[in-house]
Amino acid sequence: MSHFMPTEILRFLSGKGKVMKVDIGPLLRGECGKIDIDFTLTPEPIEGVEFESDAKVRGCVTDNAGYMRLTLDVELPYKASCARCLDEVSDVFEVSFERTVATPGMLSEQQLADNVDEYVVVEHGMLDVDEELTETLILEFPTKIVCSEDCEGLCPVCGKPKREGCGCVEKHVDPRLAVLASLLERDDDEFPDEPSESDK
Ligand SMILES: [Zn+2]
Ligand SMILES: [Zn+2]
């Protein structure tokens, strides 16, 4: 005799890795023209990025005289270090996801294969876009995160963020002028030892 509790199993299966499945049956049957979508998606880990919460996914499926369109807006809060000054960056990544909803048989296998970014196919009246959405998040997520577009990074002399105005004097010499500078500046103990000459 089994002591399995069906409710326990259900809870276990739906606890983690929520799967978004939208029942668009009412839309297919013409009972409504729009179905709202609101769910969360657990992002795949990305190196160097911390996700404190799941992505919020909101949108809808609309039916316009048989032309069905899925529109989703994804918001994913994240924390990471600025690639230039190493400061903590706390921001929300936003991306949109749109697909034309195809019913089975509407498109050939070839048409689908050629337009994977265009369509999502209804299966048994349900839409399941978790995998594609997760993929989109990974692909679109910024590869270089900066605290601000004009972040000047760290002072090469003292290592503090430049925006703090440490006041260090950088002896930055344009490599093209280095030869000239070396001619002018005979007493070369003024020159930095860092290997910055061969950068470009
Ligand atoms: Zn920065
Ligand atoms: Zn400095």
Image (spheres, helix red, strand yellow):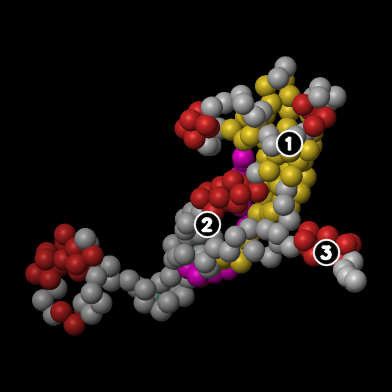
Highlighted range, magenta: 85-98
Coordinates of residue 65 in the picture (x, y in percent): 72, 17
Q: Is the residue at mark 2 in contact range of ligand 1, meaning its CB lies under 8 Å from it?
A: yes
Label 2 environment density (alpha carbons within 10 Å; few <14, some 14–19, many ≥20)? few
Task: Give the amino acid at mark 3.
Answer: Ile
At 16% from the left edge and 59% from the top edge, which residue is drawn?
Answer: 176
N-terminal label among 2 and 3: 3
130 to 31, vertically: above or below: below
Name the side, left or right, on which 152 lies relative to 8: left
In-image side of 76 versus 198 (left or right):
right
- Check residue 124 in the rendering and tell me which mark sits there, or answer none: 1
Q: CA distance from mark 2 to mark 3?
A: 47 Å
Between label 1 and label 2, give the one nearer the viewer. 1
Q: Which residue is mark 3?
A: 9
In percent of the image, x 12 and y 71: which residue is there? 182
Which residue position is annotated with label 2? 148
